[in-house]
Image: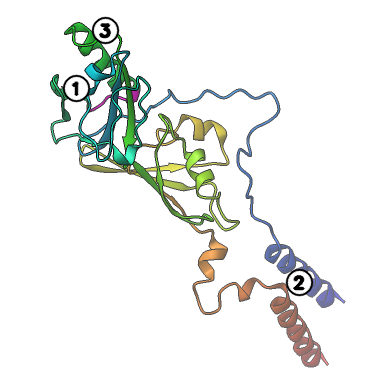
Amino acid sequence: MKLKHLMTAALAVVLVTSCSTPKIGYFQDVKAGDVHSLANPDYVKINPGDKLSILVSSKNPQLAYLFNLPIVGNYDASSSHASLNSSRVANYKVDAEGNIDFPVLGRLHVAGLNRSEIALYIKTELVKQDLLKDPIVTVDFLDLYFSVMGEVHRPGRFIIDHDKVTLLDALSQAGDMTIFGKRDNVLVMRTENNVEKAYRVDLTNAEQLYSSPAFYLKQNDIVYVEPNPRRARESTTTGNALLQPSLWISAASLLTTIIVLIVK
């Protein structure tokens, strides 16, 4: 009888272990009414090698035209609301020193500035040098990306078209994690000043997520979602077979039969 109870208990432990469900929810520490402080907003800033499109417009479109690079196609200088497709705008590439060559104004240092700061910088220079009285400067990113890899539904490279991109934005664009992604150990790889930095982020902990330096992404960041142990085991021959309840039930049944025969 004691042997029977022992075998029953062992079987119950096996079943509970094999059927356990991993925690897959985000923000598991959040309760109703909780308040969490966000990291200081980190706007995307321009680095050497980045590309920009910059459009200057004014009430005097003929004069404003002098401050725009030539484009492929027709440009209607008679319109004060000329709209240019970014694919048709000649782009500015930031050189190794962080400068661009801007019509009339010459070399401008833009590295370390965000879109709004660059627009204000150019507008201020145009007005200060009495070149345009009412300039409107529009700055857009060109070819700025981040990448998402691993256990997400749509891995790939994604364009940056907003001034701020969070880690949650990135995962949303990638279709969210699969059920096999590790929520508590997301890796963000970032190159800064020719140094590769790695950040680990726990998405189950809101406080840790919001305060992480990797909460706001930068261009060329790589987000990698690691597979959980169950997914990793699928790469082996036996895979998750050892965790299947049917296997352990059969093994327990066989063991019980052998013990009963021996006892007899």
- Residue type indicated by callout 3: Lys
Q: Nearer the viewer, mark 3 or mark 2?
A: 3
- In terms of secondary structure, where does tag 3 sit? loop
User: Residue 66 shows which numbered tag?
Assistant: 1
Whether pointer 1 and pointer 3 mark residues with C-beta atoms closer than 8 Å, the reply is no
* Residue behind mark 2: 11
**Which residue reaches farthest right?**
1
What is the chief secondary structure element of the magenta stretch?
A: loop
Give the Cα separation between the discs numbered 3 and 2.
Answer: 83 Å
Residue 44: percent from the left, percent from the top? 35, 30
- In terms of secondary structure, where does tag 1 sit? helix
Give the Cα separation between the discs numbered 2 and 1.
Answer: 82 Å
Up the image or down, 239 lies above or below 202; here it is: below
| Residue depicted at x 24% and y 34% | 47
- Residue type indicated by callout 2: Leu
Q: Which residues are magenta?
A: 111-115
